Image (cartoon, grey):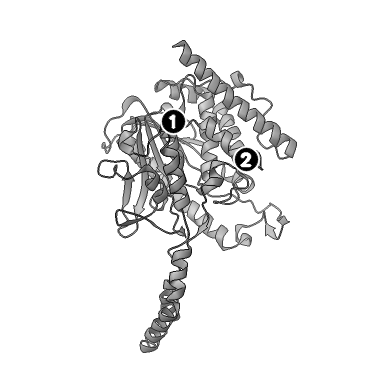
Amino acid sequence: MADNRRQPGIPGNASSERTFKAFPPPIPRRLGVVCAGGGVTGAVYEIGVLAALDDRLENISITDFDVFVGVSAGAYISALLANGVTPGLLFRNVTRSAGTRTDIDDLALFRLNIGEIAGRLATAPFTMLDAAWDFYKNRRETTLTDLVQSLGQLLPSGLFHNEGLETWMRKWLSQAGRTNDFRRLKKTLRLVAVNLDSGETTAFGCPGHDAVPISEAVAASCAIPGLYRPVRIDGIDYIDGGVRKTAHISLALRERCGLTICVNPLVPMRITHSETGIRRLGIEEAGPLRSRGLTTVLDQAFRVTLHSRLRYGLTRYRREDPDADIVVFEPKPEDLPHFMRNIMRTSGRIRIAEYAYRSTMALLDSDFKSFQRLFAKHGLTLRPACARNLSHVKLHADRASERVSTRLAASLLALEADLDRMKAARGR
């Protein structure tokens, strides 16, 4: 679903709240894209949303926007967009047939952090003896919790490492027509990570932080705590930029964007108690979230926390920068259990991308006039849905034959949009 910060769900409503200006005044027709975090499934969802928006914009691509901000998985997407990769190309890549490797498969996201794990195991006897001795010496004051905390040193800083992501990005950005240097980009790119030792946010690409290669900044922003070990850059350890905020829309406002489009996959799941549990391969696919285990409970808590921060931030930006427009595209909470079941799942990428594409198209159609007025205010022309003949695309198609036809339809739509832009370019 989308949300314009002036009034949730309805774009283009003016705000009468004017207190103070925390951001510089927006530049007319300066456009920004903010891609939030959300793991692999979040990245695929963002690709589907951006591909739908790209198809509906007349004679302009998302890659023609001025400012790109990325957090966690969104850093990967933003870096590609800023280097001119169209959402249509990304969409076609992630919706390839099941037997075909995609760029996401080549990222090698789940390489065990063997070196650190081995090192921790080697020192385990000494760590355990020190913990036991400390517990014995202070047995009148020390609790079992203190002992467990001491033994926590046996665990690595992350189960996996994401060097494969950095390597892939570095090689890809070294090709002709692309750059791994923030300073050589024609677009403004900001990738967010968090300094592990200070807890402070670092926006790579900003002055003072623009000498870092884009590939390293992407890896740092994607270092999910616990899952991946921190990424060290110039002697500083960095973790996932979503730890502080999921979107960092303020960076686009500081770059004076008049319109900022934010894609946020991380919303709390909504489960109704009337749903009947279905077990497949021993896994509960419906019913209360508690029945799905600790990881699902922690995932939901993570989503609730980050989404509440985003809502708070949108309210604050409404107050501090009333002249800029922000539109947020999010999945519907009730759809998450069916389309985006796991924050790091890759096997369902085709279904997730198609869901994001179709639901975004449906949302634009549901309030087309309002979206059209808002986009026109910033020099953008929103194409009516009828021009793309989407009547045959079903939002909740589940059968295999329907998935195939929908994927083909979506791919054809993206191809048509690319051809239209090429024709328009020749005409100019």
Regarding residue 6, the answer to whether it shows in the image is no
Regarding residue 414, the answer to whether it shows in the image is yes
Task: Give the residue at x 42% y 74%.
Answer: 149
* x then y, percent, for residue 11: 46, 29
The residue type indicated by label 2 comes to: Ile
The secondary structure type at the circle numbered 2 is: helix
> Residue 84's mark?
1
Q: Earlier in the sequence, mark 2 or mark 1?
A: 1
Q: Is residue 278 above or below residue 358?
A: below
| Residue 68 location, quadrant | top left
Task: Give the residue at x 57% y 28%.
Answer: 366
Residue position for label 2: 350
* x then y, percent, for residue 340: 59, 46
Task: Give the residue at x 64% y 21%.
Answer: 389
Q: Quadrant of the C terminus?
A: top left
The secondary structure type at the circle numbered 1 is: loop
Judged left or right of residue 44, residue 188 is left
* x then y, percent, for residue 202: 32, 48
Task: Give the residue at x 32% y 34%.
Answer: 184
Q: Alpha-carbon distance for marks 2 and 1?
A: 23 Å
| Residue 296 location, quadrant | bottom right
The residue type indicated by label 1 comes to: Gly
Q: Is residue 88 above or below residue 306?
A: above
Q: Is residue 173 above or below residue 55?
A: below
In front: 219, or 5? 219
Judged left or right of residue 216, residue 386 is right
In front: 419, or 191? 419
| Marks 2 & 1, CB-CB < 8 Å contact | no
Q: Is residue 8 above or below residue 375?
A: below
> Residue 173's mark?
none
Between marks 2 and 1 in the image, the one whose residue lies nearer the viewer: 1
